[in-house]
Image (cartoon, rainbow, N blue to C red):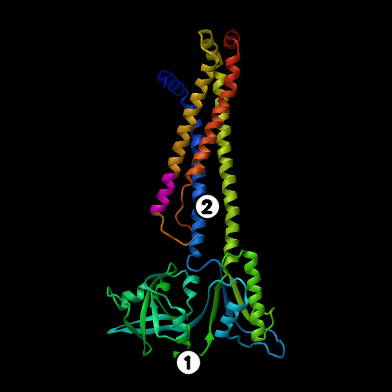
Amino acid sequence: MLNLDAWHETLETLRRHKLRTLLTALSVAWGIFMLVILLAAGRGLERGVEYDFRDDATNSIWISPGKTSVAYKGQPPGRAVRFENDDVDAIAQQIRGVERITGRFYLWGEFSVSYGMKTAQFDIRGCHPGHLYIERTRILEGRFINDFDVKGRRKVAVIGPDVRAQLFGRRDPLGEYITIRGVKYKVIGLYEDDGAQNELRKIYIPITTAQLVYSAPRQVHHIMYTVGDADLQQSEGMAAATRDLLSRRHRFSPDDKRALRINNNLEQFSKVQEIFAWISVFVWVVGVGTIFAGVVGVGNVMLISVKERTVEFGVRKALGATPWSIVKMVLQEALLVTSLAGYAGLCAGALVVEAVNRYVPENDYFREPQVDFEAALWAVGILVLAGALAGVIPAFRAARVHPVVAMRGE
């Protein structure tokens, strides 16, 4: 049962030693506060970097053609490498582990697009069905381009929210026809994308249709594919195999980095994750060091407290107090101070993090810091335990001292 007299006595003891109690509480609260802030800051930085990867699949490889910089098998340097549809098919068939693949055909610059009496400028891209997954595009209404659209060179289009807003307003665009450079396209889907604002101003059409209508038969400007569940080493092997395959098909040196540029998103994402693993270690080292400083502070204060109260303990024993009642009194004092101070530090840290979330403008480097309550509660528990042990050990020694010996210290 709750012993109100014991708690009243504990509070009275703490009141008599206000400065000591305040310093102990501050050391505990500050340790928890700093741990909460550091963990939240680390999580905010990590989310900021993850946000940069939101637009594209992190397990994707992007391939861009360039110009040869060295002579190779009778071919002169300075020769432009040009991808074709067959290159996309060759990669899909010969590179093991390819999950989704797409070619991309750019209609350079913004094209005049009209619907009825409304006209606006938008970017047009030709692509394969796999583009949906590589760009992490979400279909809101209708569907994306499929294989039948590509094979049949259908004049169909998938539009973004900005295109719908400017051309259709609140009207349902599905089934309607838009005109791009005098050619009509049927709107079959409406998409959403987490990328930058300009990603919402694009119109996707089948790559074969773009090649046919805009007089560039079979040409591909860009090739991208995902590597499925492949790890970093396997994805690097796939990238190297892709370079070898395309160097044979286009007769350039496999070592010519300017002829072909390959960007492995998984490699970049892995490097970022490795950096944040070290940042996490650093945060924990600093946080644990701060907590350890609080533990030392609590321990020292409790040692001094027990030392100062040796005579008091002797008088209590002379009046009939048991050793366990003395130990329990010290333990109760330590638990009260450390638990309340730890909780205060946790609340203060949570309030600061919430204020940052609410009032600091969103940016690409620091987003949505979050309090790790589990780690903070563990830290509070460790501090409470450390404070209890720091007080209990000397309390046991004082409780075993004979009352006459204890009072002789006066």
- 264 left or right of 125? right
Q: Secondary structure at mark 1?
A: loop
In this view of the protein, which residue sits in the foreground, 374 or 341? 374
Q: Are marks 1 and 2 in contact (CB under 8 Å)?
A: no
Which label was assigned to residue 42?
A: 2
Q: Quadrant of the N terminus?
A: top left
Q: Amino acid at mark 2?
A: Gly
Q: Is residue 283 magenta?
A: no
Q: Position of residue 114 (x, y in %)?
A: 33, 84
Circle 1 crowding by C-alpha within 10 Å: few under 14, some 14–19, many from 20: few
Q: What's the residue type where badge 1 is placed? A: Ser
Q: Is residue 61 left or right of residue 165?
A: right
Viewer-proximal residue, 394 or 360?
394
Residue 174 locus on image (x, y percent): 33, 77
Number of the label disc, if any, that sits on residue 215: 1
Classified by dominant secondary structure, the portion drawn in magenta counts as helix
How many residues crowd mark 2 within 10 Å: few (<14), some (14–19), many (20+)?
many
Compared with residue 244, is residue 47 higher up or lower down, i.e. above or below? above
The residue positioned 43% from the left and 46% from the top of the image is 352
Residue 105, placed above or below residue 44: below
| As drawn, 358 above or below 131 | above
Find residue 386 and name its label: none
> Which one is closest to the eye, mark 1 or mark 2?
1
Q: Residue furthest front?
A: 148
Residue at 53%, 10% in the rendered image: 317
| Residue 363 x/y as whole percent | 45, 61
Check the picture and name the quadrant holding the C terminus: top right
Which mark sits nearer the N-terminus, 1 or 2? 2
Quarter of the rendering containing residue 234: bottom right
Q: Which residues are magenta?
A: 350-358
Quadrant hosting residue 72: bottom right
